[in-house]
Image (cartoon, helix red, strand yellow):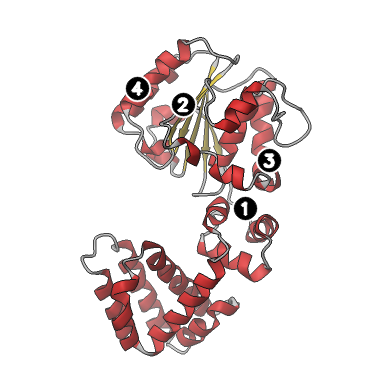
Amino acid sequence: MSRKKEDAPQILALTKQYPNAFHKAAWLHDYYRSILSRFEMGRAPNAILLSGEKGVGQRELGLELAKALLCQTPNQTDLPQVCDACQSCTWFNAEHHPDLIYLGGGREIKVDEIRTIQKFSVTKGESARKIVFLDEAERMNVSAANSLLKILEEPPSHLTFILTVERPRELPATILSRSQHYPILSPSENSVVTWLQNELTLNTDTATLLYKLCFNSPFGALARYDANFFSRVEEMATKLLNFLTVPSQAVKELETLVKDEAKATLLFELLFLALRDALYKAPTLPVLEGMVRYFSRIPAKNCLTRYERLVSIYADRHKQTRLDYALEAWFLNR
């Protein structure tokens, strides 16, 4: 797996921490089987495009496909269809497979990186197939996209591209037209909550809260969870209820609080969830009950106005010179 050495441990970190996560992610299995069957029938696409909401599993699906396509002795029954014992699987698990290039993954993909694919494609490999994995491919700059297009126009038969994206429309139409596109549907709340309960050994309320905070991002939720997750949420929910009922307390604490990106994000997430549950009069979770009761006492029109103002503050949070001032005004202007 070719990538800068300091970045490589991040590629399979989640897979290694939760080795059974893909096995139980049933919403991805039909895509997995369908794509591999095309290779078995000799109808393999040169470029596979996996799109979906952030964290729905397109990245994990792509990695499992890459591993299966490179495996020297794949099985045809279990999921995933790999032996996990051959030299190829050993290289893959160690994150330095000579026949796989991994680009992207949260950073811009530049033209010089795409140009290395030409040399990679003609260099003698250890496997019958070579794979280029473009993670978050919409991060390609214009020059990189143009360079990729030239390769896709006449791709070597042994070279397979796997692209993952959140927003496929941000890719040039010419690249979309040369890729076999698989839009991954977001799974139901019940299926994700059950999956999180099994993977993380959580009760239903905590798994549901984690699901809602991550906005139907199953693998995002998995990455976010740690042993102190619920205690952080409880502490923030208590603090926010205090801010709502005693706004002067918000003035005292917000300056320090918003300097911590994780705490600031959690602040917005919990307020959004509580406001939505109050507006829709929906069943809520125990940790949110105090805030939901508070917002439910406000006229619906005023509650909606507060929600819209909070959305505006959140959208501009990185542009704000003093985010704490904007939030102070929000808590004070009831």
Mark 4, residue position: 147
Q: Residue at x 40, y 89 (%)?
A: 245
Q: Residue furthest left?
A: 321
User: Percent x, y for residue 278?
Assistant: 50, 80
Residue flagged by tag 1: what amino acid is it?
A: Pro
> Front-most of 327 and 216?
327
Residues at marks 4 and 3 touching, judged by CB atoms closer than 8 Å: no
Q: Residue at x 64, y 37 (%)?
A: 31
Res. 112 in view = yes
Residues at marks 4 and 1 touching, judged by CB atoms closer than 8 Å: no
Residue 29: mark in rendering: 3
Residues at marks 1 and 3 touching, judged by CB atoms closer than 8 Å: no
Crowd class of label 1 (few under 14; some 14 to 19; many from 20; radius 10 Å): some
Crowd class of label 3 (few under 14; some 14 to 19; many from 20; radius 10 Å): some
Residue 2: mark in rendering: 2
Q: Nearer the viewer, mark 2 or mark 3?
A: 2
Measured Cα–Cα span from mark 1 to mark 2: 32 Å
Crowd class of label 2 (few under 14; some 14 to 19; many from 20; radius 10 Å): some
Q: Nearer the viewer, mark 1 or mark 2?
A: 2
Measured Cα–Cα span from mark 2 to mark 3: 27 Å
Element on which disc 3 rests: helix
Q: How many marks?
A: 4
Measured Cα–Cα span from mark 4 to mark 3: 32 Å
